[in-house]
Image (spheres, grey):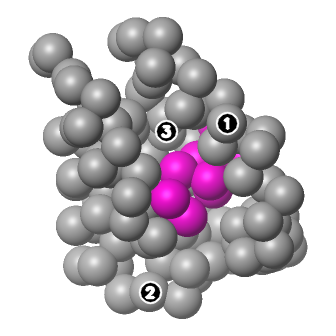
Amino acid sequence: MNMTPSDFFGAFANPTRLRLLNLLAAEKEICVCDLCEVLGLLQPNVSRHLALLREAGLVEVRTDGKWKYYSLAQPSTGLHRTLLRCVGSCLAEFDDLAADRERLAGLASGLRCG
């Protein structure tokens, strides 16, 4: 898949997708139900945004029974690598994104799918 800078920046431009990338940067792999819980969004909404991120080559999905687990895709370009590095570090400075990571860390392990 040949991604353009517009593809990457378009994927990052939506607040929900940015929040999803932020959470995926904090964990190796996350189940959709955990993402819904942390973001306070319904599963169809989260799945739609994850599908767009998958189309942009930014996330990968693994299915295990009825559960879908998402993770960040391996960077395919220097721009891809730089943007993901920024999500993992620079964006953690923003209160809303830091709060999402705290909520994810605070989920009781017994309630998490992964």
- Residue 38 placed where, x, y %? 63, 77
Estimate the x, y position of residue 8 in percent, counting from the top left.
Answer: 33, 37
Rendered residue at 84%/58% (across/down): 93
For marks 3 and 1, the one nearer the N-term is: 3
Magenta-highlighted residues? 18-28
Q: Is residue 35 above or below residue 37?
A: above
Residue 55 shown left or right of residue 57 in the figure: left
Q: To which residue does mark 2 refer?
A: 41
The N terminus: image quadrant: top left
Q: Nearer the viewer, residue 26 or 18?
A: 18
Q: Is residue 92 magenta?
A: no
Q: Amino acid at mark 1?
A: Cys
Mark 2 → mark 1, Cα distance in angstroms: 24 Å
Is residue 21 one of those drawn in magenta?
yes
* Residue 20 position (above or below residue 8): below
State which quadrant residue 54 falls in.
top left
Mark 1 lies on residue: 86
**Marks 3 and 1 in Cβ contact (< 8 Å):** no
Mark closer to the chain start, 3 or 2 = 2
Measured as percent of width and height from the top left, residue 88 is found at 71, 39
SS under mark 1 = helix
Marker disc for residue 71 = 3
- Residue 57 sits in quarter: top left
Identify which residue is drawn at 72% across, 76% down: 96
Amino acid type at mark 2: Leu
Q: Nearer the viewer, residue 15 or 108?
A: 15
